[in-house]
Amino acid sequence: MTAEPGLPDTLRDLPAWTPDAIELADLELLLAGVYRPLAGFLGSFDTAMVIGGGRLADGTPWPVPVTLAVPKDLTGHDRVVLQDPEGVPLAVLDVAETWQDPTSQGWRLAGPLEPLRAPAHGPFHRLRRRPDQIEPHEGAVLAVATREPLHRKQLGQLRQVAEQLDAGVLVLPLLGGRYDEALVRALLAVRKELPEGSRVIPVPLPRRDGDERRDVLLRSHVAAAYGATHLLSEEEVEGTAIPVAVPEPWAYDADVEVWRPVARIEPDHVQAELTRERLEELLDRGEPIPDWFTPPAVAAELAVARPPKHERGLTVFFTGLSGSGKSTVARGLADALVERGGRTVSLLDGDVVRRLLSAGLTFSRADRDLNIRRIGYVASEITRHGGVAVCAPIAPYAASRAEVRRMVTAAGGFVLVHVATPLEECERRDRKGLYAKARAGLIPEFTGISDPYEEPDDADLVLDTSAMTPDEAVARVLDLLVAGGWVRGG
């Protein structure tokens, strides 16, 4: 792929690449100067030093590797245009090093960046600011870099620490999760409960795989770049870019019905805080969040972001051999869900998808994977918008099924049903004569005969339709959905 025609002539013929979500966030923060002293994506030596000791090769403290993965066919170029998912060019990478990650064997490019335009993707972009766009604050600045809403406890602790430090408050919602929009709305909703002059600036900083300590260290670098002098944190962490301010323990005093420091509460008046698990249970069941725990405006945003499970988007993904009965059960399930009402139901049957969504694809492994990814994408969008997607492809490969699970769970619920009808029974039912043709060598790469079927080890339900009627199989799936809270009983 080459860069778009609207670029200057010197850049028009350069190859273009769209980084993944974390790399796009890194790119935005690199271009904005938030990751200073980094001038671009890291090379192999810097990356190894960061992973091994939390420092760049020159000794500068830095907590996480900031790298750019690319396909091998981009490794032979000196310059590459980096673009957003809509194809808008954001920067040119001057390739200083091409290297291979020893853990994944994937290819990486390193080098400084030449900015082309400011990124304009993502929610609440109008609220984002570069550090050089922030008016300096005289005196101390206490930053809260968070991926969670601020409930009454955190609000009280924040006000107390800000008063102790005589500091202004900077709230940095860290974007890159499933509930970005709800997070920002929830934080904006409690601005009136923050100290006067508090600022809310969303920052694209997805959570990386790794330990919590490195995540806090990275938050401290981001907060420092935005002018903070202290970072509010639940525990002390050494090596942060700015000092960590750890609040004293707070709890809810059931006697006077307020949150306050634990030291000021009689032990028998301390009311247990809602755990994350308990909060999610209440939301999943559609029960109200108690006012003593969080402000009503925050509770309302949580309820919108995480509706009750029986109202939430869901994908039921059937997989199994040709002739296993998965399409029959899937159609029966879709009909049963329509009869119950409450959500729109879309049936993505393997044969229908092949004729319409994936017309022209072959049965090679690459095309089969592409077919499943297309089904997964459509299912994830149906799920994202609160519908139910019932999918019934063969989906023989574990990797492509796992990719669909990742796509869908980023948007809602995912249930995998393995229709494990024995091959002999599938052949006996062979109304289209496909198995006979495959055994005669007339159909190459036929699943179960000349191409493997990788049985799932992560199925939520396993059915054998040779041992039950279609209605019984549908009932088994419905029972699973009712037990999981995805469908109301009755």
Image: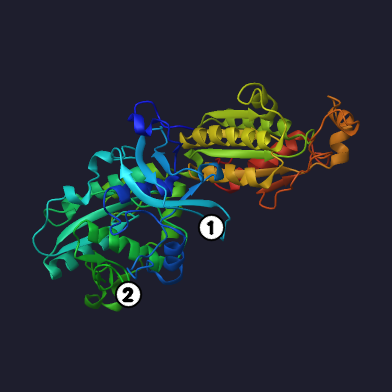
Quadrant of the snapshot with the C terminus:
top right
Give the number of the disc on residue 58.
Answer: none
Pick whichever of labels 1 and 2 is earlier in the sequence. Answer: 1
Where does label 1 land, which residue? 101
- Res 234 seen here: yes
Q: Where is 54 relative to 16, above or below?
A: below
Q: Where is 429 relative to 168, above or below?
A: above
Provide residue 299's location: percent of width, then percent of height.
32, 49
- Res 301 seen here: no
Mark 1 or 2: the one toward you: 1
The secondary element bearing badge 1 is classed as loop
Name the kind of residue labelled 2 in the image.
Glu
Provide residue 102's location: percent of width, then percent of height.
56, 60
Identify the residue at image location x=70%, y=38%: 365
Where does label 2 land, which residue? 238
The secondary element bearing badge 2 is classed as loop
